[in-house]
Amino acid sequence: EPEQPEFSVLSVSTDDVHSGELILVNNDHQYMEAGKEDLVSILEMNENNDRYFFTSVDYDYLIRRSVYEPMARMIEAFYNQYGIDNLVIYGSYRTNEFQKQLYEADLESTGEETSTLVAKPGYSEHETGYAFDFSTTPDYEYDGTGEYSWFNENCEDYGFIMRYPEEKSDLTYIRYEPWHYRYVGIPHATYIMDNNICLEEYIDMLRNNYTYDYSHLSVTDHAGIEYEIYYCPASTDSEITSIPVPSSDSYYVSGNNVDGFIVTVYKSSSGSAAEPETTENEEVQEEEYSE
C-alpha cells in the first residue's frame, strides 16, 4: 500500500473561524474582523510598481495587501492581450459607515425595505477588503462582455471568482454583478469557476462532503499544480480548535465565517513542490455602487 502522509495537530483560536481568504460574507453571515485588514492604496501601489494600465478613483481606494498583486497581474495579462487600459477600480474596501450610507441611499431611491444591489452594513464583501468592482472610462460602465469577458474566462488563474452570477442570485441574494470579483485563492477559484457554482455552494459542499476524516477534495489548477482541500469543524465548547494538518506539505488554513476551517494543502507538480500563494495569516500556531 502507498505510504500515508503524516499529519500533526495545529491549535488555533476558534474565533479565527471569522478570518481568512475563504470567509463567506453574505446576507446571513456578518463580517466579524473589521479593523484587522492589512490595506494598501491601489494608486500608491500602482505608482510604486510602475503600473499604469489601470487605475482607481482616487488614493483613498484601498484593498488588502495580499489581494493587490494577483489583481494587478490579472489586469496586466488582460492589457498585454488586448492593449486596453481603461479599467478603473470603482469599488474596493469600504468602511462599515460608508456601506451604511450606500445601503440607506439605495433604499431611499427604490422605496424597498431591502436591497438586492447593495449589501446591508456589516454583511458586504467590500468591508473585508477581498473584493473589488470594475468600471471603465469614460462612461464608468462595465458589463463584462466583449474583450472584458476575458476576466470570466481567466480570473480563476489569479485566485478570483466572479462573485454574483445571474443564475445564482437566489443563493447570494445579490442580483447579477459582472463587475464584482472576489479573491478566494487559485485552487478554490478554479473549482468554483470550472463547476459554475457560487461561494455559498462551495462552502456547503466542503462541509458536507470533504471533511478530514471522510474524503478530501483534489483540485488541479490550470498550471498543473495539485491541491488537497478539506474541512474541519470549529470547536463548539472551547476557545481552541485542533486542526489536523500535514507534517511535510505546505498548507493554508482559513475560516469559513460559518462553522469551521478549510485546509488547503499544496501538493507537488512535475516532481517539484508547489509554492503556496502569499496569504495574510500564514502564522496560525454609478455612480452605481453595488454589493
Image (cartoon, rainbow, N blue to C red):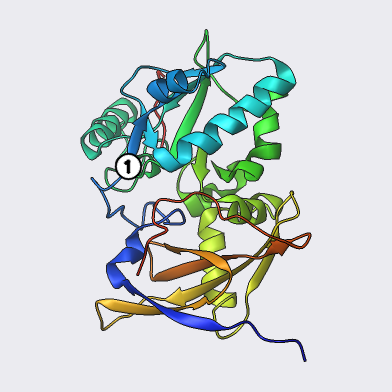
Q: Is residue 247 left or right of residue 233?
A: right
Residue at position x 33%, y 37% in the image: 39
Front residue of this view, candidates 60 and 268: 268
Residue furthest out toward the bottom: 1
Residue at position x 34%, y 29% in the image: 110
Is residue 73 shown above or below 184?
above
Q: Is residue 76 left or right of residue 95?
A: right
Element at label 1: loop
Front residue of this view, candidates 229 and 257: 229
Q: Is residue 184 visible?
A: yes
Amino acid type of disc 1? Asp
* Labels in figure, total: 1
Front residue of this view, candidates 207 and 267: 267
Is residue 263 shown above or below 238?
above
Q: Quadrant of residue 191?
A: bottom right
Q: Is residue 222 left or right of residue 200?
A: right
Residue at position x 51%, y 68% in the image: 263
The image shows residue 23 at horizontal and vertical percentages of 42, 56
Q: Is residue 179 visible?
A: no
Dot 1 alpha-carbon crowd within 10 angstroms: few under 14, some 14 to 19, many 20 or more: few
Q: Is residue 153 left or right of residue 180?
A: right
Write down the residue under mark 1.
38
Residue furthest out toward the top: 138
Residue furthest out toward the left: 97
Quadrant in which the C terminus is drawn: top left
The image shows residue 156 at horizontal and vertical percentages of 64, 45
Is residue 88 shown above or below 163?
above
The image shows residue 1 at horizontal and vertical percentages of 77, 92
Is residue 264 shown above or below 188?
below
